[in-house]
Amino acid sequence: MADIKIGLIGAGTVGSGVVKIMNKQNAFFQESLGLPVSLARIADRDLEKLKTLPVGNAICTGDAADVINDPEINIVIELIGGYTFAKDVVLNSLKKGKHVITANKALIAKFGPELFATAKEFGGSIHFEAAVGGGMPSIKTIREAMIGNDIRSVYTIINGTCNYILTEMTEKGAAFAPTLQEAQRLGFAEANPALDIEGGDTGHKTAIIASLIYDGYCDYDKVPVRGITEISADDIISAKELGYTIKLLGVIKRKDGEEAVDVRVNPVMLHNDHILASVNGVFNAVLLEGDAVGPILLYGAGAGEMPTASAVVSDIIDVARNIKSGDTNRIPMHFYAKENELTIKGIDEIESRFYLRFAVEDKPGVLADIAEEFGKRNISIASVMHKEAHDGNDFVPVIITTDMAIESDLRDAVVAIEAKAFTHGKTQIIHIED
């Protein structure tokens, strides 16, 4: 068969890893797998950096258009990141009839319908294994390995920055701000960490997974997202005392008979016996439950040069096999269209158990007043922890966990309690997933 030529745009951390793996594995791909793939062009603004990589016979350029406009290039790999130039690269490549591989979760989550419609119109395809979970084969597991299942639920720890911060806070009792600074010093957090710590990165990946599972388009902008910036050392300590661990989760599930899907990102208290409670540091995990196979756990490095490059290369081989077989739409993505948009359950409609931390005056009748407001809304209290005042503080923390409750009812109760003279400051509310 004719050579399958690849163009790489962006030779940063992940792109460099792709070059290294292709150089190492190319003979195996060609001789053992019978796939004549080769890196034909590499584009990056830093041409000096390309001189340090094993580029082989690839033509190096500083202009992405050289890759996109080369009629011999079959596959374009976009590893630039961002929404603007990267989107143009992907769309222009697809309009040339090329297949596109990307690790750009934000691009897929925000512009998926437009991208997949363009691919269909011009006969190309889009592959994005590296966009969700780095080196973990999350996308292939969902689209292929679990194809015989109705997936009942997904719980994901899928942002290494947040997981590292929460792990350090849990193990060392540190506050959020200095832990974030240390994560930045070690390279686990960006100079501008907002996308990670505010939950956006997890939200992009969660929206993509939800789209795959429910055969419809999950609009990222409609997914309730809350990050970890408000988690305090006090919450970490209280969680420990209650037998829980705090994690930032992407949650995806739907009740039988309901149309709306519960897709959200928020800090969650997991019982210490929960398998995800032991996922620590920068590691990621995806816990899926299928009706046939039961629970499946994917665990591994969710980012980094070689793990993410590994996922990109797996997509290269998938596309090459599709080209070789003559079926470039072997796994169709027709459902990723605006007209197939999923109905996302609003955060106020979520039913969950909850952890609450109030700051109240240490005087008689306070707990009774709090219980009364919960009772008015049929919210059952599961446990109460009333701590003593110290250091001359007039306000003490009261920790309450609830049985299952509707979030709108819970927040109504909190508003009523916060209006009372004995309360101080904002109440902390965290979901509990047993």
Image (spheres, rainbow, N blue to C red):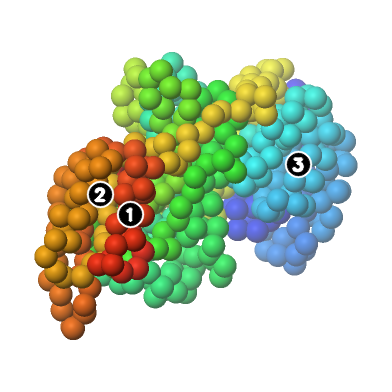
**Residue 123 x/y as whole percent:** 78, 24
Callout 3 environment at 10 Å: few (<14), some (14 to 19), or many (20+)?
A: many
Which comes before the other along the chain, label 1 or label 2?
A: 2
Residue visible at 43% across and 16% down? 148
Q: Nearer the viewer, mark 3 or mark 2?
A: 2
In 3D space, how far apart are the residues under numbered discs 3 and 1 (Cα atoms)? Answer: 51 Å
228 up-or-down from 57: above or below: below
Name the residue located 80 percent from the left edge and 25 percent from the top edge: 121
- Dot 3 amino acid type: Val
Residue type, label 2: Glu
Q: Is residue 211 left or right of residue 386?
A: right
Q: Mark 2 points at which residue?
A: 373
| Marking on residue 90 | 3
The N terminus, quarter of image: top right
Residue 181 location, quadrant? bottom left
The residue singled out by tag 1 in the image is 416
Question: With 342 as the anchor, is 107 left or right in this view?
Answer: right
